């Protein structure tokens, strides 16, 4: 395998830093397994509503959350 795979910790850290850089205070970024939905990734802010994304694996959920966060940041930067 030539490409180094990222750990879940690295993914969470990257999302946390991205969110903190653009929104200021971040309470937490995490993932959990939900019985019916599957994996759920979540960013909880102090002053905004939480951002949530789902996925079939923990990795998918974090990727989807990062994409969602990136879209919001891009939209914010366009204004």
Image (tube, helix red, strand yellow):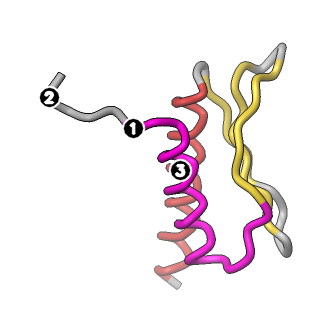
| Mark toward the start of the polypeptide (3 vs 1) | 1
Residues in magenta, as a range: 6-27
Q: Circle 3 — which element?
A: helix
Q: Quadrant of residue 41?
A: top right
Q: Residues within 10 Å of mark 2 (few under 14, many from 20)?
A: few
Name the disc covering residue 22, or none: none
Q: Residues within 10 Å of mark 3 (few under 14, many from 20)?
A: many
Q: Quadrant of residue 31?
A: top right
Horizontal side of residue 45 vs 15, given as left or right: right
Q: Answer yes or no: do the residues labelled 3 and 2 have beta carbons within 8 Å?
A: no
Q: Which residue is mark 2?
A: 2
Q: Answer yes or no: do the residues labelled 3 and 1 have beta carbons within 8 Å?
A: no
- Percent across and percent down for residue 6 are 39, 38
Q: Nearer the viewer, mark 3 or mark 2?
A: 2
Distance between mark 3 and mark 1 Cα atoms? 14 Å
Distance between mark 1 and mark 2 Cα atoms? 13 Å
Q: Circle 2 — which element?
A: loop
| 74 vs 58: above or below | below
Q: Quadrant of the N terminus?
A: top left
Q: Answer yes or no: do the residues labelled 1 and 2 have beta carbons within 8 Å?
A: no
Q: Residues within 10 Å of mark 1 (few under 14, many from 20)?
A: few
Q: Nearer the viewer, residue 23 or 2?
A: 2
- Percent across and percent down for residue 4 are 26, 35
* Residue 73 falls inside the magenta stretch: no
Q: Which residue is mark 1?
A: 6
Q: Which residue is mark 3?
A: 66
Number of labels in the image equals: 3
Q: Magenta region, mostly helix, strand or loop? A: helix
């Amino acid at each position: 395998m030539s490409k180094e795979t990222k750990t879940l910790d690295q993914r969470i850290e990257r999302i946390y830093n991205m969110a903190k850089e653009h929104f200021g205070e971040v309470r937490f970024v995490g993932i959990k397994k939900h019985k019916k939905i599957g994996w759920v990734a979540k960013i909880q802010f102090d002053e905004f509503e939480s951002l949530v994304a789902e996925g079939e694996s923990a990795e998918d959920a974090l990727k989807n959350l990062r994409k969602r966060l990136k879209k919001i940041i891009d939209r914010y930067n366009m204004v």
